[in-house]
Amino acid sequence: MTTIEKMDTHANETQEIVNKVIDLWQHEVVFSWRWWFGVTISILTWLFWIKFHNKESRYRLLLAGFFVMTVSVTLDALGVQLGLWSYRYEVFPTIPAYVPYDLALLPVVIMSLIQFKPHYSPIKKAFIFGFFTSFIGEPLIVLTDIYKMENWRIFYSVPIYIIIYLLAHWLTTRKEFIEIN
C-alpha cells in the first residue's frame, strides 16, 4: 500500500468517526443542559463585554481578544487532536475545541483584565489569571463532565495562560497604530 493510499484510508476512517460524533451530538448533546450551559456562557460573556468595556479602547481590546481566540482555538484543537484532553458537550460538533471557552470566556476575561486597573503590573495580572484559570476554572469545567483531561495536568496550563495574557497585553500597548488615510 502506498503512502497516498494509506492517507486516503485514514481520511476515510476519520470521516466515519466524525459522522458518528455528529450523529451522537444530534441525538444526545444538542439541547442538553450542558449544551445550553455552553451557549449561555458564550452569549452572556459577550453581553457583559459589550456593556462594560471601555469604548475608547474598543479596537485595541478587540485586537487582543481576536489574538486570544486564535491562539486558544489553535492550542485547544491541537490538544484534542493529540489526545491530551477531550470535550463531550461541544456547542458545535465539528470544531475540535470548546467554543464557549475559546471564543467567549477566555478572550473576554483577558480583555476585561487588561482594561481593569490598567496601571497594575501586567505580570502580576498574568500570574493571577494563569493560576485562577488553571486551578479554579479548569477543575470546574471538569466537574461538569464537559472537559476531560486525558494526558494533561492542570499545572501544565499555568505558563500557557500566563504567556497568552502577556502577549495579549503587549498587543494593546503598541503605539505603532497609525491612522489609515
Image (spheres, rainbow, N blue to C red):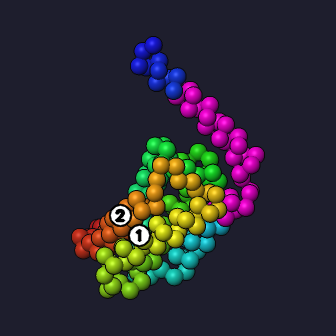
Q: Which residue is mark 1?
A: 130
At a point 55% along the width and 57% down the height, the residue shown is 99
Q: Earlier in the sequence, mark 1 or mark 2?
A: 1
Q: Find numbered disc 1 in the image and state the secondary structure of the residue it sits on.
A: helix
Does the magenta portion include 29?
Answer: yes
- The label shown at residue 159 is 2
Answer above or below: position of 100 versus 87. Answer: below
Does the magenta portion include 111?
Answer: no
Image position, residue 15 (x, y; %): 58, 32
| Of the pair 130 and 61, the residue shown nearer to us | 130
| Of the pair 146 and 12, the residue shown nearer to us | 146
Image position, residue 39 (x, y; %): 65, 62
Q: Is residue 126 visible?
A: yes
Q: Find numbered disc 2 in the image and state the secondary structure of the residue it sits on.
A: helix
Looking at the image, do the residues carrying marks 1 and 2 touch, with CB atoms under 8 Å apart?
A: yes
Q: Which portion, as a residue range, is magenta?
A: 11-38
Looking at this view, name the residue that lies furthest to the left: 176
What amino acid is at disc 1?
Gly
